[in-house]
Image (cartoon, helix red, strand yellow):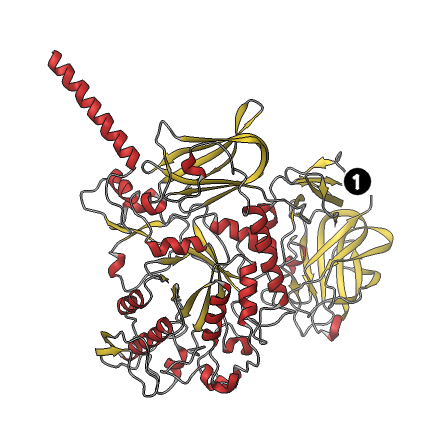
């Protein structure tokens, strides 16, 4: 028996030693960029393998860029189109001036690290002096056909310390539509030497390749060779997956492209393929959980085509179980600072607010992805003033918020406070927390956590942050995964003791860096709205930007801890007024509200509401256009509207208010989609039965086209009615149809 007990003790000791050694190394197998799932792998072993998938050196360097720029520039800038057709005369690109230094100054001010330029969009027009086509900058008046936009940008990037990337569209409408075009010309595959020699234009780089390809793939490889050998180091090659038009069953030989890129630009990552993937939208939308370790059904190293991954969940445990290969492929969150990818104008094409851009920055960079923001140059070859202003403001916020680490000098494991990615703290299910003590109480509302992804991959699945408040721990933030970087945002808290807890993980998590920060919130402007049931909502005002909405309230996201005071009795809100916590019912009347943060108050917001519209019904109308129905005039949604047809006169809308009210006036909200239909002069009629109408009075509103805001008309004397008819007499600007975005009737108190 003694020998058996001795064996058990020795065995247990050995197991404990092995476990401790494994924990110290935090690895059970070699890490790799791609790991194959075997047929005999269990769910547990699949998750263990996922915990050993890491980025390549180039991928990690791309992640460290964090915030990068996109440049869409070409014929579309002058035609004001988003997609060209490939048949544009190159001279339409009538560029007279170019200031790439101005671009780079603005990008540096925004704290961007790299710029990617569309050297060829889908129209096939090229922005460099290519040997292999005349459809491009060489056939324009710019610098007498000798200009090279990519060259000038490359020189500016070197001057201002920015990395450079290129977008080369695989789709090429010029090569499709041109009678001698190479795209889909049904040419045979044969052995081709890349680059193809061109008389009088030798290459300094003497590297050559031999690929079995067709005409178009040869053309594409020749252009890649030019881009990767004559414009300085290229750090990203961006491939769009869009296909505006196909021809001849053309296919792309990505494996040949990849071989050439990896040889000529070894530091470059490839977007749209195995290195970097699309986030799944163009709006700046982000997933709450963005895993960069994702499953594939075949080996990504051998794949010729990569599809878009647009689902909300692409890397959870359940998704990994169904894979055959586990691969590190990071997300890039791309969107535009303007409504559209190309510049159109400065007066109608809206620009994102600094709040919106900063919010996307925190959600994307702080959500395990890279933020790629498009800034389209205008027809003067510069960034427009408003774009530059927003970029500067965003850069100032990044510097002010994240330029100072409030954990500097704090006490904890030096492995998480030293900013070194290769030093880390390994945790387990028992030692699952990190406590940080500061010398003095600090006030923070942002916390950054990073995993040691280059050596240990992505492992954390759930974590939380606590603050020591009133002699106890109080949870202030929670989130799921971490990966390269997680930015946690929460209402500000002041204390000298913080705790980070890891409550769920795939294998021993390795935490490399933790930093604390403070963003100075601003009391936001407010918007007050009411739904069809009569419930009033008060929220931070959304910036008017209508292109590909991401659904986030940027001001609300970045300004946590804001209080909102409101009144419904006509008085101005004070600190003694009601605090808005949730929507509330209001029969009718005026709501006034103010935001407040740290004693600083925002501007006053007011909104006058008429009677609740839940029971309203349409009685009749002269006509309506196909999509603009009468009910849209009283649906409590000012973005929808009723619009009459063009033939009937007079234009009118009749409404049953559901019951009899004492009314003192009405509010007319014009639609803002276009200038047509704004009712400048009209008539109000009322009825006792909804059939026979009598004139009440006329109304008139001025300057609607230039100022399409809600207008209020008060009746000469209050009326009692259930049935009302709005009839148009004169449409602003000589229009022929009437339109109403919203009607509200004010109740006599």
- Between 123 and 598, the residue placed more toward the observer is 598
Query: Residue 210 at what x, y percent from top left?
Result: 22, 75
Residue at position x 41%, y 42% in the image: 481
| 291 in relation to 219, above or below | above
Q: Nearer the viewer, residue 642 or 44?
A: 44
Q: How many marks?
A: 1
Nearer-the-camera pick, 12 or 617: 12
Residue 392 quadrant: bottom right
User: How would you rate the neighbour count of disc 1 (Cα within 10 Å): few for under 14, some for 14-19, many for 20 or more?
Assistant: few
> For mark 1, what is the residue?
569
For the point 42% across and 81% down, the residue is 129
Q: Quadrant of residue 727?
A: bottom right
Quarter of the image with the N terminus is: top left
User: In the displayed structure, does residue 8 sit left or right of residue 648?
Assistant: left
Q: Indicate left or right for 327 with 482 as reference.
A: left
Rendered-image quadrant of the C terminus: top right
Q: Is residue 353 visible?
A: no
Q: Position of residue 660 (x, y in %)?
A: 77, 47
| Residue 110: percent from left, percent from top | 55, 58
What residue is shown at x 27% (from left), y 51% (from top)? Answer: 34
């Amino acid at each position: 028996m003694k020998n058996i007990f001795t064996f058990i003790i020795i065995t247990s000791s050995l197991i404990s030693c092995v476990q401790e050694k494994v924990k110290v190394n935090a690895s059970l197998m070699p890490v790799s960029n791609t790991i194959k799932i075997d047929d005999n792998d269990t769910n547990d072993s699949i998750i263990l393998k996922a915990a050993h998938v890491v980025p390549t050196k180039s991928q990690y360097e791309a992640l460290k860029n964090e915030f990068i720029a996109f440049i869409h520039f070409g014929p579309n800038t002058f035609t004001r189109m988003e997609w060209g057709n490939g048949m544009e005369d190159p001279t339409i690109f009538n560029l007279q001036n170019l200031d790439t230094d101005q671009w780079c100054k603005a990008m540096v001010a925004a704290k961007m690290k790299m710029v990617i330029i569309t050297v060829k969009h889908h129209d096939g027009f090229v922005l460099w002096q290519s040997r292999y086509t005349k459809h491009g900058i060489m056939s324009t008046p710019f610098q007498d056909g000798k200009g090279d936009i990519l060259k000038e940008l490359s020189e500016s990037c070197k001057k201002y310390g920015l990395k450079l990337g290129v977008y080369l569209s695989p789709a090429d409408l010029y090569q499709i539509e041109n009678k001698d075009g190479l795209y889909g010309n049904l040419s045979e595959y044969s052995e081709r030497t890349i680059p193809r020699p061109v008389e009088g234009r030798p290459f300094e780089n003497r590297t050559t390749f031999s690929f079995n390809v067709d005409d178009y793939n040869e053309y594409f490889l020749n252009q890649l060779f030019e881009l990767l050998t004559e414009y300085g180091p290229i750090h990203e090659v961006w491939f769009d997956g869009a296909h505006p038009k196909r021809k001849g069953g053309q296919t792309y030989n990505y494996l040949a492209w990849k071989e050439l890129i990896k040889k000529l630009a070894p530091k470059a990552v490839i977007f749209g393929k195995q290195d970097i993937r699309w986030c799944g939208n163009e709006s700046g939308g982000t997933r709450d959980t963005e895993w960069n370790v994702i499953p594939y059904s075949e080996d990504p190293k051998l794949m010729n085509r990569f599809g878009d991954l647009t689902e909300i969940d692409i890397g959870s445990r359940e998704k990994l179980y169904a894979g055959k290969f586990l691969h590190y492929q990071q997300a890039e969150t791309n969107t535009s600072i303007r409504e559209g990818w190309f510049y159109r104008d400065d007066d109608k094409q809206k620009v994102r607010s600094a709040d919106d851009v900063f919010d996307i920055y925190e959600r994307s960079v702080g959500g395990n992805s890279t933020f790629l923001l498009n800034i389209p140059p205008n027809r003067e070859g510069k960034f427009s003033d408003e774009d530059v202003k927003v970029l500067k403001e965003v850069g100032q916020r990044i510097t002010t918020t994240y330029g100072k680490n409030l954990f500097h000098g704090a006490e904890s494991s030096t492995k998480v406070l030293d900013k070194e990615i290769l030093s880390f703290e390994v945790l387990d299910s028992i030692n699952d927390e990190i406590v940080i003590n500061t010398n003095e109480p600090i006030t923070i509302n942002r916390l950054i956590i990073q995993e040691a992804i280059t050596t240990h991959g992505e492992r954390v699945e759930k974590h939380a942050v606590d603050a020591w408040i009133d002699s106890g721990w109080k949870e202030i933030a929670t989130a799921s995964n971490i990966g390269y970087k997680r930015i946690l945002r929460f209402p500000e808290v002041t204390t000298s003791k913080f705790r980070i807890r890891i409550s769920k993980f795939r294998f021993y998590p390795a935490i490399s860096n933790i930093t604390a920060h403070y963003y100075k919130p601003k009391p936001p402007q407010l918007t007050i709205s009411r739904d069809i049931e009569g419930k009033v909502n008060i929220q931070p005002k959304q910036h008017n930007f209508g292109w590909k909405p991401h659904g986030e309230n940027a001001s609300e996201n970045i300004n946590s801890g804001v209080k909102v005071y409101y009144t419904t009795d006509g008085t101005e809100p004070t600190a003694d007024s009601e605090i808005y916590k949730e929507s509330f019912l209001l029969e009718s009347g005026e709501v006034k509200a103010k935001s407040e943060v740290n004693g600083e108050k925002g501007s006053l917001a007011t909104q006058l509401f008429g009677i609740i519209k839940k029971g309203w019904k349409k009685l009749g109308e002269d006509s309506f256009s196909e999509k603009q129905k009468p009910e849209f005039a009283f649906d409590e949604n000012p973005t929808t509207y009723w619009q009459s047809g063009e033939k009937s006169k007079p234009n009118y809308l009749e409404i049953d208010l559901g019951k009899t009210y004492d009314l003192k006036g009405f509010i007319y909200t014009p639609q803002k989609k276009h200038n047509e239909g704004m009712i400048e002069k009209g008539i109000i009629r009322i009825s006792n039965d909804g059939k026979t109408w009598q004139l009440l009075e006329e109304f008139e509103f001025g300057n609607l086209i230039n100022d399409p805001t809600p207008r209020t008309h008060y009746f000469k004397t209050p009326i009692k009615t259930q049935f009302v008819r709005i009839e148009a007499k004169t449409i602003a600007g000589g229009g022929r149809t009437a339109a109403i975005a919203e009607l509200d009737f004010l109740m006599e108190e």
